[in-house]
Image (tube, grey):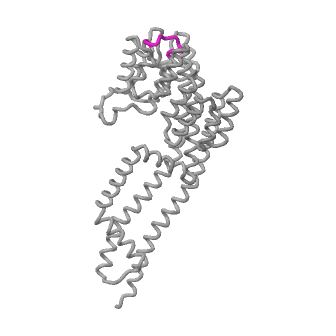
Amino acid sequence: MAQFQYRAVDAEGKVVEGTIEAVEVGAVVARLHDRGLIPMRIGAPAAGKARGPRVALPALPLLTRRPPARSLLTLTQSLAVLLAGGLPLDRSLATLQELVDHPELRRIVGEVLHAVQGGKSLAEALAQHKFFPPIYVNMVRAGEIGGFLDTALQRLTEYLERGQALRDDVRAALTYPALLTCAMGGSMLVLLVYVLPKFSALFSDLGRSLPWSAALVLGVSDAIRAYWWAGLLVLGTGIGAFRYSIRTPRGRYGWDQWKLRMLGIGTVLRKMEVASLARTLGTLLKSGVPMMQALGIVKEIAGNQVIARAVGEVEVGAREGAGVAEPLARTGVFPQLAVQMIAVGEETGRLDEMLMRIAEHYDRDVRVAIAQFTRLLEPVMIVVMGVGVGFIVMSMLSAIFSVNDLPM
């Protein structure tokens, strides 16, 4: 049997830590339940791990100010477990404040607890902080009104888990191509900045004209070394102008529209947006949020302004009694399969279930498309890197061989 570390909460909200000897994690959970404890974290200690004094490093405000992206999911999971275990809301929040490690997140939970103790609802307390998105606040509000707050938090946990899983898959699939791009760019830069200048000095002393390829490569090398500051200035100016442009409504809409029209990538981005929209709307409807309010939330949190404008048109159509599928089809933004599935959901009265199926379907499509894209991208990038480095090497070799033509 192994020794498992545990962190649990008793009926009064007090945090209890210790170790239990058991065969598996399930046995640890059962024994904690027998003791009247709610398990929060269970893990086996590392063998031979030295337990020395912990040294607290000074926090860097610029790096630790914003809570990590995963912290909202962890916070929701913990709150759902505490409420499902029978703890009152104020004790659950007090326990969370004690468990949270991030200073900024601990401050946010403390302010939420203070607001709840002051008579505000949990939704009102959460709405005071931008850390909690609109879908989060509205689902909590619906759960409080309907008397199923723990269920609403469990649905929020599922929603956040699925969204985080998709982001993790996309990030993992693009990690290797990104590293390969950096390696390729670094190799080319080293050749152009440090290696080729040695050949340039040699050939200039010989005073002979070089082959066009060698002259081109050496000219690029000289330009990079002499005018690198101008390149950085142009690059910085371009990035600044682009960021300023996409902050305007017209510029942001044009950029989002261009992304959806990109060859190959646009289709994947469209499917990602449809999956996110369907999951958000389905989760809200399943939690008891009214349709018009749910559409307003989806429009507000949409990452693409083209999609947000289309949802706005759907919202107007639904208010006029046209439902969701018909206005959605008129926008021409969403795939026909999604529109047909939504129409079936409206006809059968199971729109929330159909939206969740749409989200799962397009999640799978996105994962497959990204996997295929990365499998194709990796050899293409290797070939491009080989051709670039090979061209530089062959240019230098042709220049070296041309030295043999010099009169003795």
Q: How many marks on residues? A: 0
Percent across and percent down for residue 349 are 69, 25
Q: Is residue 95 above or below residue 379?
A: above
Position of 12 compared to 229: left or right? right
Quadrant hosting residue 199: bottom left
Quadrant hosting residue 215: bottom left
- Residue furthest front as drawn: 320
Percent across and percent down for residue 43 are 50, 25
Residue at left offset 50%, top offset 27%: 135
Q: Is residue 58 above or below residue 208?
A: above
Q: Is residue 184 above or below residue 88?
A: below
Quadrant containing the C terminus in the rendered view? bottom left
Position of 205 compared to 405: left or right? left
Q: Nearer the viewer, residue 164 or 200?
A: 164
Q: Nearer the viewer, residue 30 or 166?
A: 166
Residue at left offset 57%, top offset 46%: 268
- Can residue 88 be found in the magenta stretch? yes
Q: Nearer the viewer, residue 370 or 189?
A: 370
Q: What kind of secondary structure does the magenta stretch mostly adopt? A: helix
Position of 205 compared to 318: left or right? left
Percent across and percent down for residue 180 are 47, 54
Q: Nearer the viewer, residue 11 or 283?
A: 283
Q: Is residue 291 visible?
A: yes
The magenta stretch is 82-91
Percent across and percent down for residue 203 are 33, 78
Q: Is residue 366 visible?
A: no
- Residue furthest bottom as drawn: 408
Quadrant hosting residue 125: top left
- Can residue 159 be found in the magenta stretch? no
Q: Is residue 131 above or below residue 146?
A: below
Quadrant containing the N terminus in the rendered view? top right
